[in-house]
Amino acid sequence: MPTYRVEYTHLGDRQQITLEVDNEALDNEQKFRDAVAQRLADRILPHAELAFRHEDDRTLEQKLDKAYDVQVNKIERE
């Protein structure tokens, strides 16, 4: 699995984390960003799955922002 350095903001505090993302998510930009959001939530917000289950037209990244004030700022491959 490729490794990425993700810079994110949570409640106004800018942080970085290293995440591995499945290769199958790399073929589509939205799938990739959703995979990054999912892995980020798994690492920093164990209860975020509740927001992801909510059925609407938002992406996982948008759901993280709305429910937990987490914004992905930058993604770089290591």
Image (cartoon, helix red, strand yellow):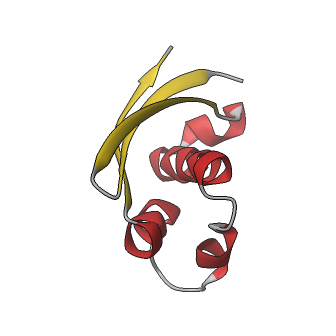
Q: Quadrant of residue 23?
A: top right
Q: Is residue 75 above or below residue 3?
A: below
- Name the residue nearer the viewer: 21 or 70: 70
Left or right: where does residue 73 sit relative to residue 77? left
Residue 22 in the image, given as x and y percentages of width and height: 71, 35
Q: In this view, does 46 lie above or below 43?
A: below
- Name the residue nearer the viewer: 17 or 59: 17
Residue at the top extreme, as displayed: 78
Q: In this orientation, does residue 73 appear?
A: no
Total label count? 0
Residue 76 in the image, given as x and y percentages of width and height: 41, 23
Q: Is residue 21 above or below residue 56?
A: above
Residue 73 in the image, given as x and y percentages of width and height: 31, 42
Residue at the bottom extreme, as displayed: 55
- Name the residue nearer the viewer: 76 or 30: 76
Q: Quadrant of residue 1?
A: top right
The residue under the point 58% across, 35% down is: 26
Q: In this orientation, does residue 15 appear?
A: yes
The residue under the point 61% across, 72% down is: 52
Residue at the left extreme, as displayed: 12
- Name the residue nearer the viewer: 57 or 39: 39
Q: Is residue 15 above or below residue 63?
A: above
The residue under the point 37% across, 65% down is: 69
The residue under the point 39% across, 36% down is: 15
Left or right: where does residue 7 sit relative to residue 5? left
